[in-house]
Image: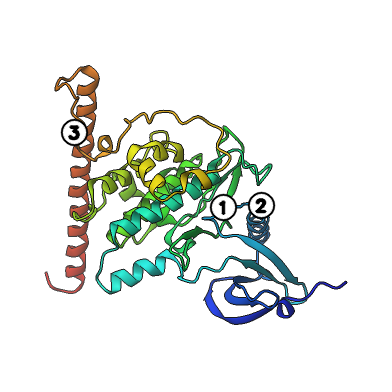
Amino acid sequence: MTEPTISEAYDFLGLCGSGSFGKVHKVRCKEDGQLYACKEINYSKMSSKEKELLVSEVNLLRKLNHPNIVKYIRRYQDKAATIIFIIMDYCSKGDLSDYVKMHKKSNQYISEEKIWSIFAQLLIALDYCHSPNKPDASGVGRVIHRDLKTANVFLCEDGSIKLGDFGLCRVLEQSTMAKTNVGTPLYMAPELLENKSYTEKVDIWSLGCIIYELCSLQPPYVATSLDSLKAKVKRGVRPFVPSHYSSEIRRIIDMMLIKEPEKRPSTVELMQLPFVAKLLQGLNCDANRRVGRVEQMTPVERGGNLRGASRGAASRPANGKCDSTDLSAWEERLRTREDTLNGWEADLAEREAQLKERLAKAGLR
């Protein structure tokens, strides 16, 4: 029996978006009437590497099974037209990038409750990806997304979110490190920007960038060139999150945007923080969405709560006394604060120099 073509199986209802290699359509299955997204990709002009990434995404999506990850349904191929069609979950509310732009245009901040909900769902999706064992995806191992950004997070009708676009993902063997410079620069971890070896901690940095952007309506580090971006990330200088957001959300952003990957928390460490654990319990997602975790949840090295993660602030011991370890921690935090202030000063000097240059060119000096 001949397999039906895409047009025989689905009705095309409209265009959702387009990219360099193809389009995303809204389609309806003729058999059951369900709505889906159809990614149409023309691979005729793709390089071998790009074709490899495409095959990687298709093969991975068909194996991953999680409520907060875009689900692969099936694929069709039109060899004559060199087009592949991928049928996936349809997320009717667009993506987080559009969501941020909408709020920025209307000059309205996103509610903290909504931001925490998005954070929790992305965290458990990443925890599933980073887990070395997935009972429903045998042999997949740890998956690093590597291109986590607002444009790759999709919003559903019921308020849930789904992580998609795994085209740049890498399946990482346990205890190994990868080394390939990929991803979107504004959300790229320092180790990726410097083309160094990396682990799944790069996704934690990107998650921090996303949560920061949801609060501030712009990425934490904005630059017009890659060199300028690297310099800003290295200095660790970024505008503060608006003050009406809680100290908890600002502190957890600081934790995820720690420059040293070995000090950056993992999904397990984030999920065991009392505030986050309570959040996940309230959303009823810890038990039924975290699948296949085999490693033990050990205490977070930076302390078991969010308060110790504040930039430029230290937690006072309960007994009011400080031992040498406490003093060292205070000194380290003061040095960090000083570095931040120095970074701000350097950033202002850079802007002043740019302004003087523009004024000189305009003949106003």
- Residue drawn 69% across and 64% down? 74
**Circle 3 sits on which residue?**
334
- Name the residue nearer the viewer: 49 or 203: 203
Secondary element at image label 1: loop
**Circle 1 sits on which residue?**
66
Tell me: 321 left or right of 35. Answer: left
What residue type is disc 2 on?
Lys
In the rendering, which numbered label is found on residue 63?
Answer: 2
CA distance for labels 3 and 1: 42 Å
**Colour pattern:** rainbow
What residue type is disc 1 on?
His
Q: Position of residue 32 (x, y in %)?
A: 67, 74
Q: Which of the two discs, 3 and 2, labels the residue nearer the N terminus?
A: 2
CA distance for labels 2 and 1: 10 Å
Q: State which mark lies toward you, 3 or 2.
A: 2
Query: Picture quarter containing residue 21?
Result: bottom right
Indicate the quadrant containing the C terminus: top left, top right, bottom left or bottom right: bottom left
- Specify few, some or many for label 1: CA neighbours under 10 Å numbering under 14, 14-19, or 20 or more: some
Indicate the quadrant containing the N terminus: top left, top right, bottom left or bottom right: bottom right
- Residue drawn 64% across and 76% down? 33
What residue type is disc 3 on?
Leu
Query: Picture quarter containing residue 276?
Result: top left
Q: Which of the two discs, 3 and 1, labels the residue nearer the N terminus?
A: 1
Q: Position of residue 274 (x, y in %)?
A: 34, 37
Q: Position of residue 290 (x, y in %)?
A: 52, 44
- Name the residue nearer the viewer: 104 or 272: 272
Q: Position of residue 188 (x, y in %)?
A: 43, 51
Secondary element at image label 2: loop
Q: Is residue 308 visible?
A: yes
Seen as rendered, the residue at the extreme right is 1
